[in-house]
Image: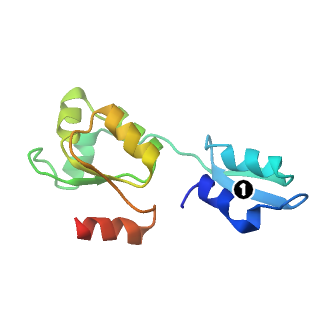
Amino acid sequence: KFNSEGLLELPELQFIKDHHIIIFSGVGGRDLLATELKKRGAIVKKIDTCKREQPKTSLSKLLHSYNFGQRSKKICVITTSSEGLRNLYKMTTLQEKIWLFNQRLIVVNQNSERLAKEMGFNQEILLAKNASNDAILKLITSY
């Protein structure tokens, strides 16, 4: 699993009392990993290494810059995080959402799948086995 839950299942992280662990993560990320490691007795330091921000552009500008100017075209949208999916949603006008929700969507975790359904994606949402490039490519080519 490519997430905190998967890391916490690793045998190497079960008995870590008094181990020093540094977590490099994005600003505003989940605290599950740090919290659970501390419960297990580890000395945890979290260092923010990146800041995720919503791009300051619109979906229309992005599509036009990649020659997807015709909204009638079908594309496959791939998102590797719920935050990315939320940002995409915020970047779209109501008219763009109607188009977007009719595109094929690939996500890498069940949280993103659930969020996409709540947002209104109409097409089947494809769930990759994990967040790796190989898993996403395998899903695309097998579909």
Quadrant location of the N terminus in the rendered image: bottom right
Q: In this view, does 88 lie to the left or right of 1?
A: left
Taking the image as shown, residue 99 lies to the left or right of residue 50, namely: left
What secondary structure is found at the residue carrying circle 1? strand
Where is residue 49 drawn, in percent x and y? 65, 53
- Categorize mark 1 by other alpha carbons within 10 Å: few (<14), some (14-19), many (20+): few
In the image, residue 83 sits, relative to residue 138, either above or below, namely above
Is the C terminus in the top left, top right, bottom left or bottom right quadrant? bottom left
- Left or right of 140? Residue 72 is left
The reply to whether residue 84 is in sight is no
Q: Position of residue 3 (x, y in %)?
A: 57, 55
Q: Would you say 5 lies left or right of 90 here?
A: right
Q: Where is residue 62 in the image (x, y as percent from the top left)?
A: 27, 47
- 69 or 90: which is nearer to us? 90
Tell how many labels: 1
Q: In this view, does 106 lie above or below 130?
A: above
Note whether residue 90 is visible: yes
Q: Position of residue 130 (x, y in %)?
A: 45, 62
Task: Tell me where residue 89 sits by quadrant.
Answer: top left
| Color style of the picture | rainbow
Residue at the image point whose x is 39% and y is 68% from the top: 135
Q: In the depicted view, which residue is nearer to us: 34 or 95?
A: 34
- Give residue 18's quadrant in the image: bottom right
| Residue depicted at x 85% and y 55% | 42
Q: Name the residue under label 1.
A: 23
In the image, residue 13 sits, relative to residue 82, either above or below, namely: below
Q: Residue furthest top?
A: 94
- The three-letter amino acid code for the residue at tag 1 is Ile
